[in-house]
Each structure stands twice: as C-alpha cells, then as structure tokens.
Amino acid sequence: MTEPWDIVISDIILPGTGGLELCRELRGRKPNIPILMLTALGTTDDKLEGFDAGADDYLVKPFEFRELYARVKVLLKRGGKKFENGVQILKFGGISMDTSGKTVSRDGVDIDLTPKEFNLLEYMLRNPKRVLSREEIAKEVWDTHFDTGTNFIDVYINYLRKKIDKPFDQKLIHTKSGMGFVLRD
C-alpha cells in the first residue's frame, strides 16, 4: 500500500499476534495515527487493555453505524483531517485540499497541480510540522527506493514551492539541510 493511512480500525481478536500487539506496533511506528478498537470484548478491563496498547477510542460490537461514523470523524478531526459534507478536506497554513475532488487552493486562490505534485502535497499535508526525508517521500509518494544519484524529489519540491509558496508572502515548504523537507508556518 503506497497511500498513507488516515485511521486504523482494528479488532482485538485477530489471527496471529492479535489486535493489541498490532496496536502497540502501529503506535510505535506511526505515533500520530488514530486507532479505533472495534471489538466484542466490552468489559472495563478489556477497554483499559486496549487503551494501554495505544488505542485512541474503543467501540463495542454490536454498534450503530452512525456512532462509528461519528467517532471516526472525531478522531480524524483531532489529527487535522476535516470533513465537509462527507468529503475529506486537508488544511494547513491557508492551503485547502479536497482529496476526493482533487482540488487545491491557498488563501482562496485555486492552484493547478499535476498528479505527482498533488500526491506529494497530500503527503506533506498529512504530516505537517514533521521533517520528511527524501527516502521517506520516495517510498511513500513514489513507492520506490531513493537513489542518491537522482534529484527527482528536489525537483518536485521546487515545482510545489513555485505554485504553493512563490505567489504568497508566507512560505510553508522548508528545507532542513541534510534531513529533508517540512511543511510548517
């Protein structure tokens, strides 16, 4: 899977290591990803064990779908993801991205991006204020291993800067020398 996950919904009873171990592993690798445990195990001890493993929320089966939807919306909102009429909108520093309609604007000005530029900006919007190495960007956006003999990531960052930063006073895409790139205001 090349797209970053927005949320993880897991049961406790899973084949192999189980949902609690999966939760611990995910929490260690992706500390900011929202995790919702959706399970039939509903005692207070079960819930506490789920929270101790790193779950952000816990919903017991059987459940109403509307409640699941509401809890997912809340968890995504905490992580900076917003929904408007059921459509996910990513926002940061005046940038607004409709992930379904594939549109981007900054401070109300529409910005035309190529598909690769869109995917790169989406990844940055899903990971704001975090330094993203060239290796991580290559793996997560292009599904490839970074070749230090090429500068394709720098080229696409430059394309984004021309469209996202150049026409505006405040610059959002920054370089951390020797480390990578960060979206911050």
Image (cartoon, rainbow, N blue to C red):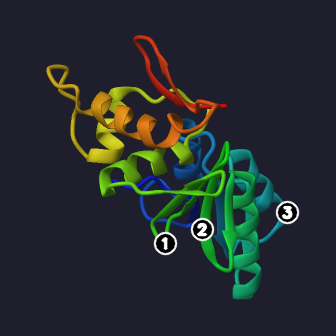
Residue ranking furthest to the front = 167
Where residue 57 appears, as percent x and y from the top left, is 75, 60
Q: Mark 2 highlights which residue? A: 88
Q: Is residue 83 above or below residue 68?
A: above
Q: Is residue 94 above or below residue 57?
A: above
Disc 3 marks which amino acid?
A: Thr
Q: Mark 1 highlights which residue? A: 100
Q: Is residue 30 above or below residue 66?
A: above
Closer to the chain start, of discs 1 and 3, is 3
Location of residue 140 (image quadrant):
top left
In this view of the protein, can residue 29 be seen by the observer?
no
Q: Local crowd at mark 2 within 10 Å, few (<14), some, or many (≥20)?
A: some
Where residue 89 appears, as percent x and y from the top left, is 61, 63
Q: Quadrant of the C terminus?
A: top right
In this view of the protein, can residue 51 be seen by the observer?
yes
Q: Mark 3 highlights which residue? A: 44
Whether label 1 touches label 3, CB < 8 Å:
no
Query: SS at mark 3?
Result: helix
Q: Quadrant of the N terminus?
A: bottom left
